[in-house]
Amino acid sequence: MQTGRPEALAENYYLANFHRLADFVVDTYRDILTPAERQWYDSLQASTESAQQLYIRLLSRKGSVFRLSRISYPEIESLDSAASELATRGLAETLPPDNLQILLSAFTKPELSALLIPGGKWPRSRVELIDELLAANAGEQARFSTILQQADEWITLYGHQHWSVFRLGYFGNLYQDSTEFVLQELGTVIYENYALDAPARPFATRSQLNAHLRYFECEALLDTISLKEVRPLLALVAQLPVMIAGDDHLLRRVDRLRNRIARQLERLGCQDDALELYAVSVHPPARERRVRLHLGRGELDHAGRLLSLMREAPFNDAEDQVADRLQQQYRKAAGLPAIKQVRFKPQTTALTLSESSDRVEYAARAFYGRLGDCYYTENALVNAVLGLFIWDIIYFPIAGAFFNPFQSAPADFYQPSFSARRANLLMTRFEELESESRFTDRVFEAYERHQGKSNPLVRWDQISLALLSHSLERIPVSHWRAMFQRILSDTRDNTSGFPDLILFREEAGYEFIEVKGPGDVLQKNQLRWMQYFDSHGIPCRVVNIRWAQDVIGKAGQ
């Protein structure tokens, strides 16, 4: 939803946004910023507007070395003066670079050919041309450098490492940038106005901030090193940050890297190294991989102990299901009789419809629309009602939850700690489910008050007032409670897997319907939800669609 969209951004929007970000970081983290970081921002603030404009424009571009002739920003009156001022303040350098590879990368293939090999035979690609020039003897390379240095005026920007600290302090990651400001200013995204108090700041100490910086450095390194060699992978493991007590966000991030590296070590045949790395990871699929490796090596005692831990305290429903499958493999390897497992089979009916160009879900919705009000909701409905019901709890100022004003969700929303850290708030709120009127009043009030705001559970374009009204009227509060509890037990996995349709028959009641076309099969997370529905008396079934020419839909009503 868009509201209050301006006709155009202000000319200096990026300058204002940069200072908005930087001022926030200085105010919030002044005590843990280094003198060099504070001096960097002080120097930029003391610069003229033109110098600031040039610096911030270049800071958002790839690389740090630029040719002045390739820079064009109408709002900057004199590029030469701005560049010279930045150099005087230690924020840039206007001397040409010495490194030939950097110089070569600043020119196009036609430019390089014209400057360095006029009239010569050109290789087919720019990459081949640069490789050929770099392979020249030392004397030729020196000549190339001199020609390229004199071919233009240059500016090399300093301070990227400080900018990374400021971005991390503001966004909590190095993926987001000032585009978030633009989206807000255009009204494309509307964020909740939650509290950003210093006591709740995500980084309490410099060592904690440095640990997250190290994580991003390691993540970037993993994407550049050879994955076919063991030594670089093990060297990267040694560089992973030391864990900070209570920082679940860092633990999840580093575990994700550990699991990636360990899986690659497996592929390279380094099972001992992989097992050692998996052993310090608490996030899936670390335990699964360990069990599989131990089974493959015939180490049944190790596999059995791990399986017992997985079954007694699974990380989530998905790991629980994995443990069931691995248990069968373990028993077979140990020479034990297999345990007969009763597989859940959801109620299933068949429906024959005239073949349509529409998606099968839409064709089924049209058919069931004859029996009452039928909506295509999939994951939207139950998530949205929960999001509306606990809206203020989602945005409650918990330490480390909010880095900046541009978060649709707290940083820990998809972590197990989300519910645990808000247990008292959620318990008190769930008491309102004892009264249907209190529950529905809160949901409707949130629907009106927060219309259009970003929320990780609410898809406004899929939740109409009619759908909301029907749902709150027909679905028993006990069913809402059960579904909410399962979502909150694992917000990462359990916010998906819901059936496609919900049908409110004309006479009474409701029913979830999962639609499957020819050849479609149920996904694991869909089966988990259906089994949960079955155990809690929530009506649900699978409808298998079959196409027939000129046949009126029938069966499975």
Image (cartoon, grey):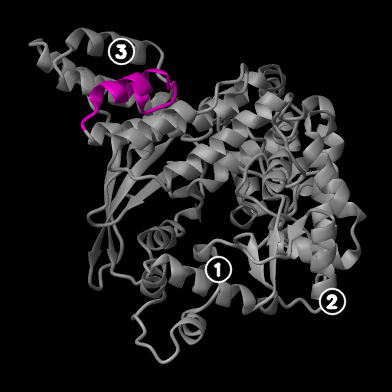
Sort mark 3 into few (<14), some (14-19) or many (20+) by Cα contacts within 10 Å: some
Q: Whole-percent x and y of residue 104?
A: 51, 70
Quarter assignment of residue 385 = top right
Task: Tell me what residue is drawn at x 81 percent, y 46 percent.
Answer: 40
Please name which of the two marks, 1 or 3, marks the residue nearer to the observer: 1
Q: Label 2 amino acid?
A: Ser
Q: Which residues are magenta?
A: 269-288
Please name which of the two marks, 1 or 2, marks the residue nearer to the observer: 1
Q: Whole-percent x and y of residue 403?
A: 73, 38
Q: Label 1 amino acid?
A: Leu
What residue does disc 1 label? 103
Task: Tell me what residue is drawn at x 65 percent, y 77 percent.
Answer: 152
What residue does disc 3 label? 306
Locate residue 340 relative to residue 254 in the image: left or right.
Answer: left
Q: Whole-percent x and y of residue 368?
A: 42, 56
What residue does disc 2 label? 78
Quarter assignment of residue 46 = bottom right
- Residue 289 in sight here: yes
The residue most toward the left is 335
Q: Label 3 amino acid?
A: Leu
- Using the image as rendered, state which of residue 41 and residue 169 is in the foreground: 41
Q: In the rendered structure, which disc, 2 or 3, sits on the residue that comes first in sequence?
A: 2
**Whether residue 127 is situated above or below residue 214 in the rendered picture:** below
Query: Mark 2 and 3 residues: CB-CB less than 8 Å, in contact?
Result: no
- Using the image as rendered, state which of residue 356 and residue 286 is in the foreground: 286
- Using the image as rendered, state which of residue 314 and residue 368 is in the foreground: 314
**Whether residue 423 is situated above or below residue 101 in the rendered picture:** above
Q: Whole-percent x and y of residue 107?
A: 54, 76
